[in-house]
Image: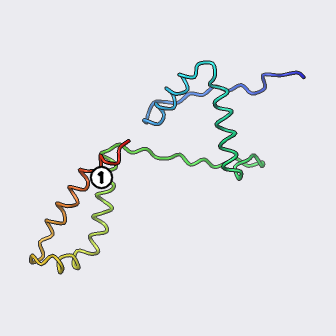
Amino acid sequence: MIISDKYRFTLQWNAGTAEKVQAGDFLEGLGNKKSEFVVMAVAEYLLTHPDDLPSGTRPKLIVKQSYNREQLESLVKTIIEEKLSGTQAIVRGNTGSGGDISEIEADIDEMLMNLDLFEK
């Protein structure tokens, strides 16, 4: 049996996200076993995503967006404000304080400050 070096690749990426840095550090730590790990990871991926097996078309990969804490807080606050904008009349009617919504806004701010509970 003749073994060839048919599959030779070079990978490079910038360290623009925490995930990329983590992946780079992990692969660097593997030393000469990087190739074995990549083969194992791709094989595992194809087992769990059989629709992506080569069939003459390129598989569509979806890259997960990475958010930093400030971006996540802004996104959550925007979503909450959008949801509340449609219900402010109902909320004002139920506060019993003559339409003062500051208590609800304070609760939202407190919730956003507690997002660190969800950090790794």
The part of the image, by quadrant, that contains residue 76 is bottom left
Residue 119 image position (x, y, % from top left): 35, 44
Residue 60 image position (x, y, % from top left): 63, 49
Tell how many labels: 1
Placement of the C terminus among the 4 image quadrants: top left
The part of the image, by quadrant, that contains residue 111 is bottom left
Residue 10 image position (x, y, % from top left): 63, 25
Kind of residue indicated by mark 1? Ser
* Identity of the residue drawn at 19% across and 66% down: 104
Colouring chosen for the image of the structure: rainbow
Judged left or right of residue 20, residue 57 is right
The part of the image, by quadrant, that contains residue 90 is bottom left
* Identity of the residue drawn at 69% across and 49% down: 52
- Give the answer, above or below, for where 72 lies relative to 17: below
Label 1: how many residues lie within 10 Å, few (<14), some (14-19) or many (20+)?
few
| Residue placed most toward the observer, 112 or 79 | 112
| Residue placed most toward the observer, 50 or 66 | 50
- Give the answer, above or below, for where 84 lies relative to 90: above
Q: Among all residues in the image, which is located at the extreme left?
A: 98
Q: Among all residues in the image, which is located at the extreme right?
A: 1
* Identity of the residue drawn at 23% across and 60% down: 108
Placement of the N terminus among the 4 image quadrants: top right
* Identity of the residue drawn at 84% across and 22% down: 3
Judged left or right of residue 2, residue 11 is left
Judged left or right of residue 100, residue 74 is right
Judged left or right of residue 106, residue 64 is right
- Give the answer, above or below, for where 44 lies relative to 9: below
Residue 40 image position (x, y, % from top left): 67, 34
Which residue is the site of mark 1? 74
Is disc 1 placed on a helix, strand or loop?
helix
